[in-house]
Image: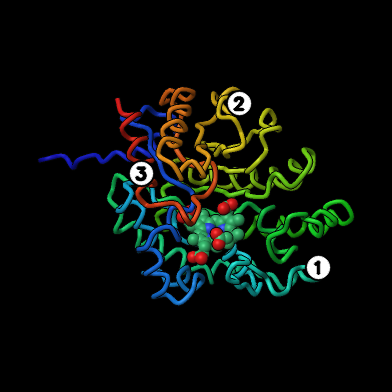
């Protein structure tokens, strides 16, 4: 009897630090406005949120960057804010202004309106998107599920929208830490169930985005953000050890020495020198990142950025990515050039 071919998934191998024939590469926010194919599907859906909530269309845009750019992994098309939305917070994406919650949380009583079980049930469209995507994705390509870190989500839930000062959430942090911890605990409980179900639906890896990690001083970061990320990682690792976990706390290069926890890959943002991340974390975690996204504006800048990262990482214990999301006005040609260059320059 002929043996079924064993299909290797280079991305997950690399997440566990195994040697791979080349360094896998994907881009944060790789399904998005720079792709005309994305814009067409988004128009069909009506708006961004209905695109997230229509599994067939969300799956279609999830697959686009793999088909068009040859990325080694697809990332679920959704948004970190669907979790608070489905906990019961009214959310709108306002053109040119970004996401807005109409009734931000102001006091401990407001927490009673947030429902963990309802969120788990209402997020079915995400699980369905994952199932459809996984059934259509080539077997050797990984599907990455994701969520926002409890701190980043709580910040949006308290501020109501993006902020430069974080004044409302930081006032809570110092004046009413009990409320903030209660909120973070509740969000963490939702995320445990949500990420678990993403894995059960077919996600091959998961990433936790802590985009606003850098808003706090060191002691506050460990007390209000990192602690909850670690709790989420421990929950998932103890149940799904074969599913790699990627963490992406943005802008915390000053605290790398104190980073620990049960995850596999540390996402390095573009402001952190990759040499520093390698020195502090490279022996304990696989590193992902971290080309400055604006380098995608120019091919020579891409060449130099890729070369520098390869020189430091030497094709070991590394996943190529940008150091934050791709910008909406990048040319598809340059995005393709980046992915292809990484494949060419790292293959053995
Ligand atoms: O990476 C991917 O391709 C998967 C999809 C994805 C989106 N948002 C789609 C999206 C992911 C992983 C996210 C995460 C996300 N969302 C984060 C964490 C990562 C980061 O960038 O720091 C944050 C902070 C959000 C919240 C959010 N969603 C903002 C601030 C905005 C508006 C800013 C913008 O780019 O317009 C969004 C909207 C959003 N999420 C878009 C996309 C493709 C743009 C919507 C559109 O106009 O089509």
Quick check: 135 left or right of 169?
Answer: left
Give residue 72's mark.
3
Q: Distance between the residues labelled 3 and 1?
A: 42 Å
Give residue 269's mark.
none
User: How packed is label 1: few (under 14 Cα within 10 Å), some, or many (20 or more)?
Assistant: some
Task: Indicate whether 302 appears above or below 68.
Answer: above
Quick check: 256 left or right of 134?
Answer: right
Q: Image quadrant of residue 342?
A: top left
Secondary element under disc 2, as helix, strand or loop, is helix
Image marks 3 and 2: residues in contact by CB distance under 8 Å: no
Quick check: 97 left or right of 137?
Answer: right
The residue depicted at 74 percent of the width and 69 percent of the height is 104
Q: Nearer the viewer, residue 224 or 239?
A: 224
User: How packed is label 2: few (under 14 Cα within 10 Å), some, or many (20 or more)?
Assistant: some
Q: Position of residue 191 (x, y in %)?
A: 59, 57
Q: Position of residue 344 (x, y in %)?
A: 31, 32
Q: Which of 231 and 89 is in front in this view?
A: 89
Secondary element under disc 3, as helix, strand or loop, is loop
Residue 35 shows in this picture: yes
> Sequence-wise, which precedes: disc 3 or disc 1?
3
Mark 1 lies on residue: 106
Point out the residue furthest to the right here.
Answer: 175
The residue depicted at 51 percent of the width and 46 percent of the height is 239
Q: Position of residue 251 (x, y in %)?
A: 66, 40
Mark 2 lies on residue: 276
> Sequence-wise, which precedes: disc 3 or disc 2?
3
Point out the residue furthest to the left here.
Answer: 1
Q: Ligand 1 quadrant?
A: bottom right
Image marks 2 and 1: residues in contact by CB distance under 8 Å: no
The residue depicted at 62 percent of the width and 43 percent of the height is 249
């Amino acid at each position: 009897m002929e043996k079924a071919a064993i299909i290797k998934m280079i991305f997950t191998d690399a997440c566990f630090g195994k040697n791979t024939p080349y360094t896998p590469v994907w881009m944060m926010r790789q399904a998005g406005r720079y792709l005309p194919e994305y814009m067409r599907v988004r128009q069909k859906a009506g708006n961004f949120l209905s695109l997230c909530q229509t599994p067939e269309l969300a799956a279609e845009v999830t697959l686009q960057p793999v088909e068009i750019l040859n990325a080694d992994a697809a990332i679920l098309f959704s948004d970190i804010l669907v979790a608070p939305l489905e906990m019961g917070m009214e959310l709108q994406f306002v053109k040119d202004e970004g996401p807005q919650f109409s009734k931000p949380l102001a006091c401990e009583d407001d927490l009673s309106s947030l429902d963990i079980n309802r969120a788990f049930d209402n997020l079915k469209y995400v699980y369905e998107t994952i199932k459809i995507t996984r059934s259509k994705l080539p077997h050797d390509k990984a599907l990455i599920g994701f969520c926002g870190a409890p701190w980043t989500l709580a910040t949006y839930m308290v501020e109501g929208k993006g902020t430069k000062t974080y004044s409302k959430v930081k006032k809570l942090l110092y004046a009413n830490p009990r409320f903030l911890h209660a909120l973070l605990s509740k969000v963490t409980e939702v995320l445990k169930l949500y990420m678990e179900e993403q894995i059960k639906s077919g996600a091959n890896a998961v990433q936790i985005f802590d985009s606003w990690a850098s808003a706090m001083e060191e002691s506050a970061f460990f007390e209000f953000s990192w602690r909850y990320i670690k709790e989420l990682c421990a929950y998932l690792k103890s149940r799904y050890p074969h599913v790699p976990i990627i963490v992406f706390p943005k802008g915390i290069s000053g605290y790398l020495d104190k980073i620990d926890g049960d995850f596999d890959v540390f996402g390095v943002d573009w402001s952190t020198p990759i040499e520093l991340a390698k020195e502090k974390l490279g022996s304990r975690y696989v590193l992902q990142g971290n080309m400055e996204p604006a380098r995608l504006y120019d091919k020579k800048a891409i060449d130099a950025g890729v070369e520098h990262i390869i020189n430091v990482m030497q094709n070991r214990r590394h996943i190529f990515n940008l150091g934050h999301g791709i910008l909406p006005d990048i040319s598809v040609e340059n995005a393709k050039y980046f992915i292809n260059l990484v494949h060419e320059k790292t293959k053995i």
